[in-house]
Amino acid sequence: MNDRSTLLMYAIRGPVVLKYVAQLTLVQAGLFLLPVTIALFYAEYEIALRFIVIACVLVTITLSFIRLPVPTHIQTNEALAVTVITFLVGAAAMVYPFMGAKISFIDAVFESVSGITTTGLSTLADVEDKPRSFLFARAWIQWYGGLGFVVLAIALLIGQQPGNRRLLCKEFDRDGGVMGIRRHARQVTQVYLLLTILSTLVLFFSGVDGFIALIHSLSAVSTGGFSSFNNSLAEFNGWSIQMLLSCIGLLGAISLPLYYHIYQRNFRQSTSAQETLAMILLIASVSIILTVVIAKNGNIDWLTSAKQALLLALSAQTTTGFSSLNIANLDPLVKGIVTLSMAIGGDIGSTAGGFKVLRLLILIKLMHFTIQRTAMPSHVVFEPKLAGKTIYSEEIINVFTLLGWFIALIFFSWLPFVAMNYHPLDALFEVVSATATVGLSSGITQTELSPVLKIVLCFDMLAGRVEIIALLVCLYPKTWFGKRVDEL
């Protein structure tokens, strides 16, 4: 790095990060009220006590930092640090309560990280024997991790302070910068709540037990995929319920601001609308290909193959992670196709993970633009556009940078699995599933998995949820050490 760029860099300011992390941690403590209530209702007092203890610890630690002065501005690296630290605190806070379900420390850490990042990978072979409050807490942490309690806090607590725009992910702002930030966050939260309530009611009136309906609705809308059954979707009798849950996952994988654009009837020129259409086309294409492969190689009739292929395509593309099949027994070609689908993921501004469909559309548009440009005079000014909007150089750089880091993360996470003699394709499937926050498993993730590999997957899940750039910023020494802006 040259001297000039170093001189222009500013390290994060401790009071700024502590102020916002403290506020968001208080939100986390407040969100514990529901698991405590569920635990008390089912007379699972040990888990209730564990949640109460952690909530008290969080409140005690953060009270002194809440009184710190409000900054007049917040740097990008400070906003990214707040996001990463908040997710880390959220995961750490769930470890002690999860251990109340009689699971080991490392498995409790894994479940917590998998939950807060909406991944849904689990090392537990049997969840049906676990306390109901534990099953609810896993789904609940996915639900508020899916929306991001950063947005919840902005909607409820922080208001119109100057630093808010950087705390809100840029992915929520591409189509709707005209709205006030607090109003925007509230609208997204309202859409999320409405989807959850409606999904729970539809499942309940479809004959699903109320508690089961609630858990699976929380997991589906957040595209998390934690189930209260060992066999996930396969436990439900009838393809209709399985399909209903998969469609709820699809609703969660659609950009949340798009719902409000539809309500306002101004969605036609929205990039989110084109992105959603592209995602649906991808699901349809993957379903058709999987149907043919499963029917030909699995000795299954065409109708059953089509049903299972559609469920699998929905689960992979939306990154929900529900499963109606044993992935470990699938044809290698099926695993390869599903791996690619998981890597792409859902919409930007949704609860889905992956590289995101919009970024794929930008890449395709740039490829097309490169070909078009060769037929034009050199002096002609012609810029690539998507949904009638110019794709600016900053967006192009961001897309290629993220793609490079995304591939690098998958590759270097895949190497230790191969070094420990796991099948290369199964290892790639597992790493992509973790990095794209999907939760489908090739059978590698289990209690017996090496703690080192569990930590690798935890890192992948966290990087996939906050996006790798944010995590790298937190690991970069100059983020923490160096000259700082004097004023707050």
Image (tube, rainbow, N blue to C red):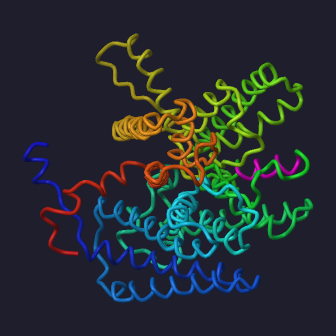
Q: Residue at x 80, y 65 (%)?
A: 212
Residue 390 seen in the figure: no
Q: Residue at x 71, y 80 (%)?
A: 38
Q: For residue 344, which quarter of the picture?
A: top right
Image position, residue 160 (x, y; %):
43, 74
Q: Residue at x 65, y 40 (%)?
A: 316
Specify the quadrant that holds the N terminus.
top left
450 to 376, vertically: above or below? below
Q: For residue 169, which quarter of the picture?
A: bottom left
Residue 248 colored in magenta in the image: yes
Residue 443 colored in magenta in the image: no
405 lies left or right of 246: left
Query: Main SS of the magenta segment?
Result: helix
Image position, residue 270 (x, y; %):
58, 44
Residue 233 seen in the figure: yes
Specify the quadrant that holds the C terminus.
bottom left
Image position, residue 196 (x, y; %):
72, 64
Name the residue furthest left: 3
Total number of numbered discs in the rendering: 0
Q: Residue at x 69, y 68 (%)?
A: 135
Residues 411 and 401: in front is: 411
Which stretch did the figure color magenta? 240-249
421 lies left or right of 287: left
Image position, residue 244 (x, y; %):
82, 50
414 lies left or right of 42: left
